Amino acid sequence: MSTTAKRVKDERKPKFKSRQHNRCKLCGRPRAFLRKFGICRLCFRQLAHEGHIPGVVKSSW
């Protein structure tokens, strides 16, 4: 099944709640999903570096 087909399939409401799987809203990636932001770690990193996510800064110590 192609990625586009998976996205369309995931947009439909599942018959049972346990079948629901989180996907990134930007790229559709099923793994490494951050619930708080609703996106995957790769998109999160990119948006954080660009400064599009308020309050997120790269940590250094």
Image: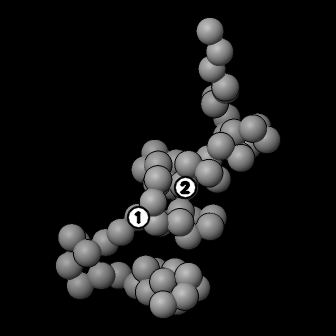
Q: Does label 1 or label 2 sit earlier along the sequence?
A: 1
Q: Residue furthest top?
A: 61
- Is the C terminus in the top left, top right, bottom left or bottom right quadrant? top right
**Three-letter amino acid code at disc 2?**
Ile
The image shows residue 12 at horizontal and vertical percentages of 41, 85
Quadrant in the picture for residue 2: bottom right
When the figure is inspected, residue 9 is found, relative to residue 49, above or below; the finding is below
Colouring: one colour
| Tag 2 residue | 39
* Identity of the residue drawn at 62% across and 67% down: 27
The image shows residue 48 at horizontal and vertical percentages of 69, 39
* Identity of the residue drawn at 67% across and 26% down: 57
The image shows residue 39 at horizontal and vertical percentages of 55, 55
The image shows residue 42 at horizontal and vertical percentages of 62, 51
Instruction: Please say whether residue 38 is visible from this viewpoint.
Output: yes
* Identity of the residue drawn at 75% across and 38% down: 49
Quadrant in the picture for residue 26: bottom right
Mark 1–mark 2 distance (CA, rounded to whole Å): 9 Å
| Tag 1 residue | 22
**Three-letter amino acid code at disc 1?**
Asn
As rendered, which of 54 and 20 lies closer to the eye? 20
Mark number, residue 30: none
Numbered disc 1: secondary structure: loop
* Identity of the residue drawn at 52% across and 80% down: 7
Is 50 situated left or right of 9 in this image?
right
